[in-house]
Image: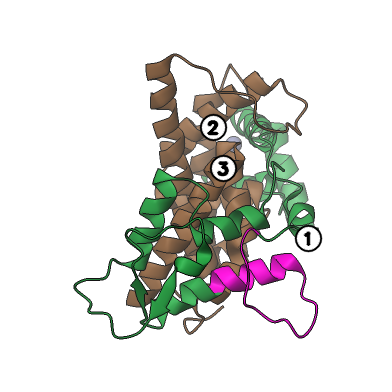
Chain colours: A green, B brown
Amino acid sequence: MNCDKFEMLLADAIGEELADTDRATFEGHLALCEKCREEYRTAIATVRTLRTLPSATRVSSAIDRDVALPFASGAVKTRYVRPWVRVMRYAASVLLAFTAGYGAHGLGGADFSSPSTVVFQTGVGAAERPTFGKALAGNFRRDRGRSDLARGLIAMFPSNP
Amino acid sequence: MTVKDAPAECFEQYSRQVYVWAYRFLGRHHDALDVVQDVFLRWNTQCADAAPDRPYGWLRRVTINRALDLCKARRREVEVDDFSGAGQETVASGRDPLDVDALREDIVAALDALSDAQRSVLVAKVYDGLTFARIASELDLAVSTVKTHYLRAIRATRGRLHGRWVDL
Ligand SMILES: [Zn+2]
């Protein structure tokens, strides 16, 4: 086997997908070829280094524990729904309202400290309503954490993982 | 997921994953939240036009690109302020927090130098642990192409991390 043909096996090995049936071929070439041996060794070291970058390993547990809702939710009251589920439903409904073609009334200058001031209604002229996305994103940047979607997100991910 | 899925369902299904991707490269809770919001606003806009039929791949690509942009913007701010803004994070790697920040910066710079496809493959493989077959299906590429992207991404990254982080 030459080094070019070895490439696919090398990718398999570095990607931890080397088939048992290919192992002997792979190791046979490594034993004979110093260049590929170095390639393999340094690639493995690189992957190991990349993986030392920490991530949000405890996200799930942070989301799954009960968190206080930062806004009143008009969602399901008839049976107990875990707060984070309600938050996600609320955030989802905000997104849905937009995609369903509703206008976001008064979002440009709305007071986001009270979610009740965010009113969705039909029939607002397309020219006079800001796009929901722009209003939300703009507000979020000026005053982080105060848009409804941002409130939902902060409730979902309440602390550093 | 199929093309008929609403953005809101997508949000419910993938927001945690988007957060995890963003946090990995930003290391800060509120920056990661910024990215989550931004990505789903873009998703919303995208769906109004045509929903990508591979949401997971789309979200990964957009999230990582957005996180890298924010990282670079943050670094520029740090350079201007001459301020090292380490410290908010919990470090799970056993490295010193300042080291983790520096490592993150170098990894971000390395990823930034890759093509979109190489970057997606590298993150999917190294951090998400997906198989080449799954990545190929997500990105609509041949498996051999995915493997080639992976090798090239590893080589380029190794060049960037060589010496300082990777003991060769
Ligand atoms: Zn060789």
What type is the residue that disc 1 sits on?
Answer: Asp
Q: Report in which chain the residue with disc 2 lies.
A: B
Quadrant (top left/top right/bottom left/bottom right) for the N terminus of chain B: bottom right
Q: Vertical placement of A161 versus B62: above or below?
A: above
Q: Report in which chain the residue with disc 1 lies.
A: A
- Residue A79 seen in render: yes
Instruction: Tell me, yes or no, whether the highlighted magenta stretch contains residue A88.
Output: yes
A49 and A133: which is toward the camera: A133
| Element on which disc 2 rests | helix
Q: Vertical placement of B69 versus B82: above or below?
A: below
Span colored in magenta: A70-92
Residue B103 image position (x, y, % from top left):
59, 26
Q: Report in which chain the residue with disc 3 lies.
A: B
Would the CB of label 2 be found within 8 Å of ligand 1? no
- Left or right: A130 in relation to B39: left
What type is the residue that disc 2 sits on?
Answer: Ile
Ligand 1 position by quadrant: top right
Assess whether mark 3 and mark 1 are in contact (beta carbons under 8 angstroms): no
Residue A106 image position (x, y, % from top left):
33, 67
- The residue tagged 1 is A64
Q: Residue at x 66, y 58 (%)?
A: A156
- The residue tagged 2 is B107
- Residue B60 seen in render: no
| Element on which disc 3 rests | helix
Assess whether mark 2 and mark 1 are in contact (beta carbons under 8 angstroms): no
